[in-house]
Amino acid sequence: MTKTKESKSRRKIFGGNLKFSFLKKKPVDPSSEAAYKKLRKEIDQLQEEKAVAQSKIEQMELEKCVEKKAFIKERDDLQVEVTKLQRMIEDLKIQLDNAQSELEEAKEKQNILSSIELCKVNGWLWKRGVKGPTGRNWRYRWFTSENDGRLYYYRKGIIQLIPRGSIDLERITAVQDLPASEENVENSCFNVVIPSRTYEMKAKDEEEKLRWMDALNHLIYWAKRKASCNEGHVLCTDEKP
């Protein structure tokens, strides 16, 4: 039998209205559509949550940027303040050093004046002349040291002592002991040397000479130290004559 004959035979058997199921669209399962919509809704919700989270992240980054700028500004302001304070500290340290130097200088001056006062000496000595009617004769003079750094000498008057001169202790370069000789039998002579002159002195005996020489050396030391202090160059050495 041919194919055409078979088709006609089938249409005759089934009444000519035969429809094949594989050619017709299958109905949608209501349960599958609901699941789809549920998934779609969940996806939309997640998209919204993602957008909110992304917005928060951007806001946080913006706030972080603003906070960073504020932090940098605050840090810079603090650094400026620290620099000002450091300058103030340095200025105060300089003032403190100056005050300490002034205090040390004042103490040094007071120490010098006290030492000069303690070393103060006076008494009678013979001083050999270099001019005048008596020439190189010995002249009896009263010598006394003063706080102004000078050794004054006077001659005896009828009522009071008459000033005859002074020696600047600071200018004394040497106090020389002279050995015994025919002219210096008592071994009581010594010289006081300054750049422009040598003063020849004689005490009553050797013991008195040594006392004067020791006192003069101490006075010279403190007079030079006082002058150095007044010039702003305090002697550092504590060595004494």
Image (cartoon, rainbow, N blue to C red):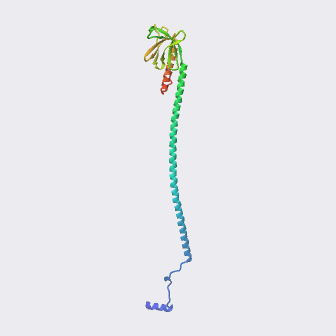
Residue pictured at 52% horizontal, 34% vertical = 95
Residue pictured at 46% horizontal, 17% vertical = 174
Question: How far from the left and from the top, in percent, is residue 150?
Answer: 50, 18
Q: Describe residue 2's horizontal placement relative to residue 99 as left or right.
A: left
Which one is in front, 133 or 95? Answer: 133
Q: Is residue 186 above or below residue 52?
A: above
Q: Is residue 209 above or below residue 70?
A: above
Q: How many numbered callouts?
A: 0
Which one is in front, 147 or 30? Answer: 147
Question: How far from the left and from the top, in percent, is residue 35?
Answer: 55, 73
Which one is in front, 15 or 144? Answer: 144
Question: How far from the left and from the top, in percent, is residue 130?
Answer: 44, 11
Question: How far from the left and from the top, in percent, is residue 237?
Answer: 49, 25
Quadrant holding the N terminus? bottom left
Q: Residue furthest front?
A: 159
Which one is in front, 84 or 192? Answer: 84
